[in-house]
Image (cartoon, grey):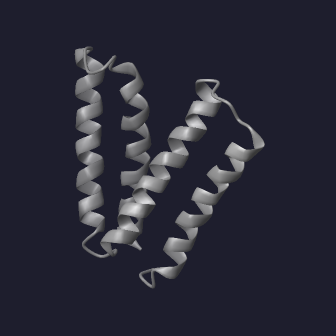
Amino acid sequence: MKAWLILLAAGLLEIFWATGLRFTDGFSRLVPSVIVLVVAWVSFYLLAVAMREIPMGTAYAVWTGIGAAGVAVLGILWFKEPASAVRLFFLAMIVIGIIGLKWSSGNN
């Protein structure tokens, strides 16, 4: 269970750094760029730690799924990106996939 909590933290940090890219202006703004790079490094590190116990394919898919779904939701909520029914359906499919990978991993 500890590995899954570490993976969750890594995924949440991925949301943070991926969203933060928007504020780096193509890495031309120093402070946001440094913050994004540090948070990305910590996210990658936690992913690697989680992979000690969770199979690589599962861990990576869950990590990217958390990041992709989280960034998309933040885009809808904070940046007024479209929230069509089709888009929300596919976001739900990502979340279902993450849950399914966790459930089927046999590494609870």
Residue at 31% x, 70% y: name it: 56
The one of 70 and 108 positioned closer to us in this rendering: 70
Instruction: Look at the picture and state if 31 lies above or below 51.
Output: above
- Taking the image as shown, residue 105 lies to the left or right of residue 60, namely right
Quarter of the figure with residue 28: top left
User: Residue 47 in the image: x percent, y percent?
Assistant: 30, 58
Residue at 42% x, 54% y: name it: 64
Quarter of the figure with residue 4: bottom left
- Taking the image as shown, residue 89 lies to the left or right of residue 51, namely right
Quadrant containing the C terminus is bottom left
User: Residue 87 in the image: x percent, y percent?
Assistant: 68, 44
User: Residue 94 in the image: x percent, y percent?
Assistant: 58, 57
Residue at 43% x, 47% y: name it: 12
- Residue farthest along the front direction in this orientation: 86
User: Residue 84 in the image: x percent, y percent?
Assistant: 74, 38
Quadrant containing the N terminus is bottom left
- Taking the image as shown, residue 39 lies to the left or right of residue 82, namely left
